[in-house]
Amino acid sequence: MHLLQFTGLSGAGKTTIARSIKTALEAQGQPVAIIDGDVYRKNLCADLGFSAAHRLENIRRLGAVAHGFVCRGSIAIVAAINPYESGRRHMVHAYGARTVWLDCPLEVLQLRDTKGLYRRAALPEGHQEKIYNLTGVNDPYERPAAADLILHTGHESVDASVSRLLDFIRQCPPTRCPEWLRSE
Ligand code: ADP
């Protein structure tokens, strides 16, 4: 089984691709768990903010949840911005995660702006709707140095990205799990 860690800016397509992959793989009988950062920030990670330390703690927790799914036979996808190399490295070293970078240019994201976040980040200082922690705009995004797969979601269709990811998953060696975490 596999643990995939997605990384990419808000609106790059993490949730869209994760859901499409889940549909495709489950149609073939392969269970998939999506550990979506936006969802877990409402429960398990509700105490965390957006500082570097909290973003790293967020990934650490999502990784532990994902690993549990993998060891029980699912493919797990951590779909979060995951902006720091140290967080991504932790996932690789602790769980053998494969890194999938959804690389979409900022100009495309600003046009898409599905959640209205880029508009809000561009507001003038002091505006009551302005946000100050949007990754890639006014919060850091470290470009991945060691991605296993790059999906160019700015100019590739969703179907094309999903098809490339399915090919990648098929040729990936499985993640190892400790004996005590394997299901009987
Ligand atoms: P994220 O989870 O990264 O914040 P979303 O999946 O919520 O991003 O939104 C991505 C948006 O971009 C969706 O409206 C989706 O239809 C669109 N999109 C266009 N091309 C692609 C692609 N190749 N992969 C993923 N999403 C795409």
Image: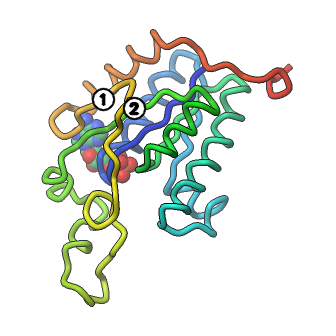
Q: CA distance from mark 2 to mark 1?
A: 6 Å
Helix, strand or loop under label 2: strand
Q: What residue lies at 72% left-to-right and 35% top-to-bottom?
A: 68
Of 78 and 148, the residue lying toward us: 148
Q: Quadrant of residue 149?
A: top left
24 left or right, relative to 97: left
Question: Residue 114: x, y in percent?
Answer: 27, 58
Name above or below for residue 28 compared with residue 89.
above
Q: Residue at x 21, y 70 (%)?
A: 119
Mark 2 and ligand 1: say if the CB distance to the nearest ligand atom is below 8 Å.
no
Q: Residues within 10 Å of mark 2 (few under 14, many from 20)?
A: many
Report which residue position mark 1 lands on: 150
Residue that appears at 54% across and 39% down: 34
Give the residue at mark 2. 100
In the image, what residue type sits under mark 2? Val
Secondary-structure class at tag 1: strand
The answer to which image quadrant residue 53 occupies is bottom right
Q: Position of residue 54 (x, y in %)?
A: 55, 62
Residue 131 versus residue 114 in the image, above or below: below
Q: Which sits earlier in the primary sequence, circle 2 or circle 1?
A: 2
Q: Which mark is residue 4?
A: none
User: Measured along the vertical axis of the image, is residue 112 above or below residue 170?
Assistant: below
Which quarter of the rendering shows the C terminus? top right
Residue 161, position as x, y percentages in the image = 29, 28
Q: Residues within 10 Å of mark 1 (few under 14, many from 20)?
A: some
Taking the spot 25% from the left edge, 72% from the top edge, the residue there is: 121
In front of the other: 57 or 183: 57
**Circles 2, 1 touching at the beta carbon (< 8 Å):** yes
Measured as percent of width and height from the top left, residue 20 is found at 40, 32
Name the quadrant containing residue 19: top left
Amino acid tagged 1: Ile
